[in-house]
Amino acid sequence: MLPQIFFAYFAVVITVLSILVITRKNPVHSVIWMLVLFVHIAALYIFLNAEFLAAIQIIVYAGAILVLFLFVIMLLNLKKEEQERKFHGYWPLGVLAGTFFIVFFILILSKISVFPKLGPYSIQAIQSEGSIMTIGKVLYTDYILPFEIASIVLLVAIIGAVVLAKKRIE
Amino acid sequence: MDIPDIAITLLKVVITVNVVLLHVAYAVWCERKVIGHMQARLGPMVVGPHGLLQPIADFVKLFFKEDVIPTNADKPVFFIAPVIGVIAALSSLAVIPLWENFSIANLNIGILYILALSSVGAYGIILAGWASNSKYAFLGGLRSSAQVISYEIAMGLSLVGVMMLAGSANLSDIVNAQAKYPFILVQPIAFFVFLMSVIAETNRPPFDLPEAEAELVAGYFSEYSGMRFGLFFMAEYAAMFVMSAMVVVCFLGGWNGPEFWIFSHVPKIVWFLLKVYGLMFLYFWLRATLPRYRYDQLMGIGWKIFIPLALANIVITGIIKLL
């Protein structure tokens, strides 16, 4: 019973927070609600026994990406954009797409009756050697190619940022 | 987890938080005394013998002061900003092993938990600067967030070497791995980088750019008064205490002490606290000795020296571990 209550709490709060994020007039308030949202998502990961993912969620998303968001928002002068209607004209389209996907997912989920077989990484297996070691082993053996591709993509982004910054000086 | 377990955990939480807050109060007194004597002054002398009751007087004064809120400040954000800082600093205490088998939560991701909370702590500073609706506070907040993000990278990278040696991110395991010798002997570069990054991360001199008095009044908390100002103070000193404890746990052998003669009868917590006090003294010593860095120098040191050093340390540790 307790797990269901926990999950219900997080599901409801995450939904409410997501709505709060997109409905705030002041972008800084949006970012603060997003921070609370990220903490709840991290809690959901802990709930799934993925403590490493939870820590990474906070360090990367809350600690780095969201702070950069906040930085950019604070340095831009958003007073003018706030009053303009050009950002608010698309909501009927959004509602339409949203309803479509909700119906779509409910239809799919109601059709699923067979659950896939459990893989080798059960909760006991992960707890016996720790989630960090498990993820590390899998990343560097089975998923080495996607892992390397991701790192190259990030490297390209870093080089791109350096090139853009250099142009200014010349 | 049944009810007795929860009660014991709660008791541990209450004891740890209270002991640390007492330490925070007397760290302020100690800092004023140490810096006073280093500058050939006496420091606080009036309240109690040698000013020993000064923290209590300060607390009472801060508590009863008028709480001034600037006009056009964003009130809800202004209110929660100092609380975020305090909560982030005090929650970090949960995973720190004070002595054998005593940590409130023995997490397998202890190091990552501390790093995550220290990055959340940055929000208190940046939001305080923004919500105050003041140029000085805003500039202080921006500076501080840039500084904290930059030094967090060096901090995290310098701990990777420790994790590689201990084979775990659990803080108790890391201390147990140092039973024979502390990691400072095998990870001197990581120790240096971590110690300096920690000083920058907690916004302490010589890296206290966010609150550079000469340029920014008091930086991000210029507009705060009364108990809210006190909360920022508490957050800063609690963060110093937590980070000193991290240095002790990761590099100085945690609760392990010398094991010969009468030293083996000393309780383990004494060794832990002695090392923490030594590091706190280092904080005060640096503040009394060194002038403040310039902002571009600070960012330059962080990105061009500490991060490459920490990366080189990881590579070297990896190669030595392979051999």
Image (tube, rainbow, N blue to C red):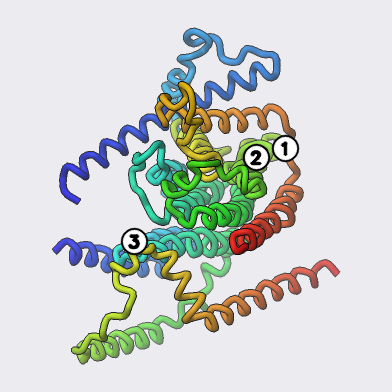
Residue A56 place in picture, x, y as percent: 46, 63
| Between marks 1 and 3 in the image, the one whose residue lies nearer the viewer | 3
Q: Which residue in the protein does label 3 denote?
A: A43
Point 54% across, 57% down: residue: B164
Contact (Cβ within 8 Å) of mark 1 with mark 2: yes
Q: Which mark is residue A70?
A: none
Q: Which residue in the protein does label 2 denote?
A: B208
- CA separation in Å, label 1 and label 2: 7 Å
Crowd band around label 3 with a 10 angstrom C-alpha radius: few (<14), some (14–19), many (20+): many
Which subunit holds the residue at mark 3? A
- CA separation in Å, label 2 and label 3: 33 Å
Residue A73 place in picture, x, y as percent: 57, 63
**From where the camera sits, is residue B62 visible?**
yes
Which subunit holds the residue at mark 1? B
- CA separation in Å, label 1 and label 3: 40 Å
* Left or right: B152, with A3 as reference point: right
Residue B165 place in picture, x, y as percent: 54, 54
Point 59% across, 46% down: residue: B201
